[in-house]
Image (cartoon, rainbow, N blue to C red):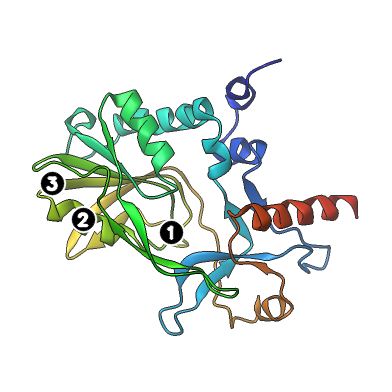
Amino acid sequence: MDSMVEMVRGMSLLQALDYCGGYYDCPKDSNGIRMGPLVGYAGKDPTTGKNLVGDVYANFAKMECWPRVMELFVGRLWCSLHYLHLPFQPEDIDAFCGAPMGGLAAAKSLGSIADKRFIYPEKKVTKVASGSERGESVLIWDRHQPQRDEKVVLVEDVTNNFSTTGEMIDLVLDEGAEVLLILSLLNRSPAGITTFEWRGVPYPVVSALTKPIPEYKQEDPEVASDIAAGKIVWKPKSDAGWARLVAAVKASRIS
């Protein structure tokens, strides 16, 4: 039997993620009616403070279970840096800093491929998740932290609203280190953002794949009735949440 990495070698990133069991696209009938639940995103509506929602979820936790598959796609991302017009050379990087928890596996693979340090902050919970809202947390250094004057690259599995990216940049700068750019496997921001500006400084955003994915406020007419009916999974990466999404896809194929 072929290994998992051989099975996905010729696939695109999302095809491979789907093959690993980590891609959800809400099934719809011929009239566009949802046959499965929406998913809750980490980003929030700045007016109401409520989490945004959508039809698509990329669960890279499923790919993390296959280190060689993760390394295959991270390796492609690392190689791409050598062909981009960046204000530094890839070899100048001192450390890859993974965003918890999604960026840890990718950052560790990058550190292994490039023979650089792998570091990451950790989450300190400040608000426990409820039935209708995701939990909240802040980032702190614990096991690892950047060294003074190190050149650091931030690594995330999915970039979208960059809700924690600014916090990570501040953490790195507070240690006297420098942030060079932001890497991600999937950039799903609606505008396809290629530069993230924080405190007046632009940081390049480089991704293995850029695929804008729509997201909605909970009150938007496109989703309001589904949310009212309870057709939403607020914690899609949890075992119970992901099982519900998988079950919805299977049921739609049978019907």
Residue 37 in sight in this render: yes
Instruction: Name the residue at the right extreme.
Output: 255
Q: Position of residue 93 (x, y in %)?
A: 20, 34
Residue sitting nearer the eye, 137 or 14: 137
**The C terminus lies in quadrant:** bottom right
Q: Position of residue 160 (x, y in %)?
A: 43, 59
Q: Position of residue 212 (x, y in %)?
A: 51, 57
Q: What distance separates the C-alpha of mark 3 from that of mark 2?
A: 9 Å
x 78%, y 57%: residue: 248
Q: Quadrant of residue 95?
A: top left
Q: Earlier in the sequence, mark 1 or mark 2?
A: 1
- Of the numbered discs in the image, which one, if any, rests on residue 177? 3
In-image side of 45 versus 153 (left or right): right
Residue wearing tag 2: 171
Mark 3 and 2 residues: CB-CB less than 8 Å, in contact? no
Amino acid type, residue under disc 3 in the picture: Ala
In-image side of 26 versus 180 (left or right): right
Amino acid type, residue under disc 1 in the picture: Asn
x 47%, y 69%: residue: 128
Residue wearing tag 1: 160
Amino acid type, residue under disc 2 in the picture: Leu
Q: Residues within 10 Å of mark 2 (few under 14, many from 20)?
A: some
